[in-house]
Amino acid sequence: QVQLVESGGGLVPAGGSLSLSCAASGSIWRLDPMGWYRQAPGKQRELVATVTSGGFANYADSVKGRFTISRDNAKNTVYLQMNSLKFEDTAVYFCNARSIRIIGGWQDYWGQGTQVTVSS
């Protein structure tokens, strides 16, 4: 089992910045990738950004150039720096990690979610 604990959400005015972090613990061999998803009220959960253990990052078009994802493999922690926030970035942000099993196979884990609210 892998536990993901997020931190860093909150209320920020439009144009502001916020950073999120997510620390993984438990039975970990390799987490690949780690990432962030978000879900706004009445909408489906969507990809925000993911990053592989090798540092390859993938972003949703809506956040490219504004958000930066990074990770510390030694700490099993993934970060999301969010700049130039817009009202439409308001959502619950969920950390995700794909745990690769040493015996083969994988399983996805999710954090509990952290609220990000951008005031217009």
Image (spheres, helix red, strand yellow):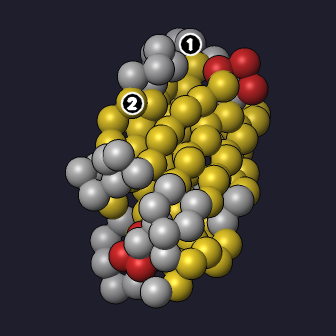
**Which one is earlier in the sequence, the residue at label 1 or at label 2?**
2
Asked whether 64 or 42 is in front, the reply is 64
Question: Is 100 on the left-hand or right-hand side of 28?
Answer: left
Name the residue carrying label 1: 102
Q: Label 2: how many residues lie within 10 Å, few (<14), some (14-19) or many (20+)?
A: some
Which residue does the image show at 40% across and 44% down from the upper left?
Answer: 49
Q: Which mark is residue 57?
A: 2
The N terminus, quarter of image: top right
Q: Amino acid at mark 2?
A: Ala
Say if residue 107 shows up in the picture. no
Dots 1 and 2: beta carbons under 8 Å? no
* Residue lying furthest front: 15
Q: Amino acid at mark 1?
A: Ile
Q: Label 1: how many residues lie within 10 Å, few (<14), some (14-19) or many (20+)?
A: few
Asked whether 93 or 112 is in front, the reply is 93
* Residue lying furthest left: 61
- Image coordinates of residue 111 in percent, x first then y, are 61, 55
- Image coordinates of residue 20 in percent, x first then y, are 64, 53
Which residue does the image show at 31% across and 78% down from the upper left?
Answer: 43
Say if residue 77 shows up in the picture. yes
Q: Is residue 95 above or below residue 16?
A: above
Which residue does the image show at 67% across and 47% down from the upper left?
Answer: 21
Question: Is 104 on the left-hand or right-hand side of 5?
Answer: left
- Image coordinates of residue 48 in percent, x first then y, are 38, 52
Q: Which mark is residue 43?
A: none
- Image coordinates of residue 71 in percent, x first then y, are 59, 30
